[in-house]
Image (spheres, rainbow, N blue to C red):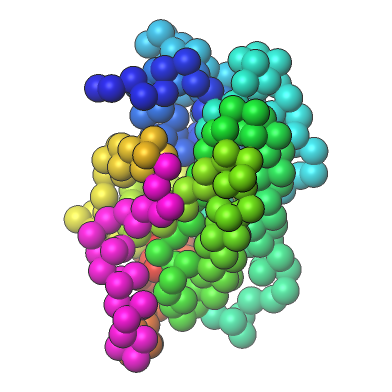
Amino acid sequence: MTERFAGEVVLVTGASSGIGEALAREFASRGAALALLGRRTERLDTVAGELRTAGNRALAIRCDVTVDGDIEAAVAKVLAEFGRLDVAVANAGFSVAGKFADLNLDDYRRQFETNVFGVLRTAYAVLDPLTRSTGTLAIIGSVSGYLAAPSASPYSMSKFAVRALASALRGELAPRGVSVVLISPGFVESEIRRVDNRGRFNPEAREPLPSWLFMPTRRAARKIVRAVSRRRRELVVTVHGRLAVTVARHMPRLTARLLALVRVSRPEPGRGNGTGRAGGA
């Protein structure tokens, strides 16, 4: 495999599991030094230790993107350890699900604090080092940034917002030499559907959707890293994700009819009690 990232430093938020962990491993396989950020320190340490055992440079840093100052402190540690930053992946996020009438403003604030303001905090913290390296900011959005399903309004709103942010930043940061890549996954294997509305991971919750629907995380990571390497404007991951985005763009009435049939709910421990959600990241 081509070591496109040999000698470069990559930072990934939400790197303890799912797409974030897979991205860290994929970047490392292409020669990058990794900064793994997240809240679950034991899992971060495990991933970083495995990467170091395989001969990669890796640094695990506890970081909560909802806390002012956390990401700035993490970036300072990365620069102190590696001296540079070439790619930052704003991946940390979760999904709040539920009917509008059953949710409240705090549910929406909690969703936006991680999925939107967490991305903003990350972008501000990495702006200067990415400018110095003429690097890349990758933002993990979702197909839900194009499709707003019933009972998924908080999550869809947050992903619509980061899609708009990526579009605006792309033009603003280009004069600095910084590329902005938006990644919009469909259904990809991850733990996100086992995280409750308060962002707490429930290991006993079952995946509410059939396994055949999901793209393996490692395969998705390869596609994402390739897109970052090529500095693509956007990558929609999975065939059904691309189909959904195409339908949303060109057949809005059909999209509205189909979405009216969708019901999104949070799985409870030990059983799947709904159809999941409209996006995979």
Quadrant in which the C terminus is drawn: bottom left
Foreground of the two, 253 or 173: 173
Please state the extent of the stretch shown in magenta in the rendering.
231-254
207 versus 255 height, above or below: above
The quarter of the displayed image where residue 142 is located: bottom left
The secondary structure that most of the magenta stretch takes on is: helix
Task: Count the marks.
Answer: 0
Q: Going 62% across and 33% down the picture, which residue do you hit?
A: 130
In the rendering, at what x and y percent does residue 277 appear?
Answer: 41, 67
241 versus 61 height, above or below: below
Q: Going 63% across and 53% down the picture, which residue do you hit?
A: 172
Foreground of the two, 46 or 32: 32
Left or right: residue 175 compared with residue 145? right
182 versus 97 height, above or below: above
Quadrant in which the N terminus is drawn: top left
43 versus 94 height, above or below: above
In the rendering, at what x and y percent does residue 221 appear?
Answer: 35, 39
Q: Going 52% across and 47% down the picture, which residue do you hit?
A: 180
Left or right: residue 60 compared with residue 186? right
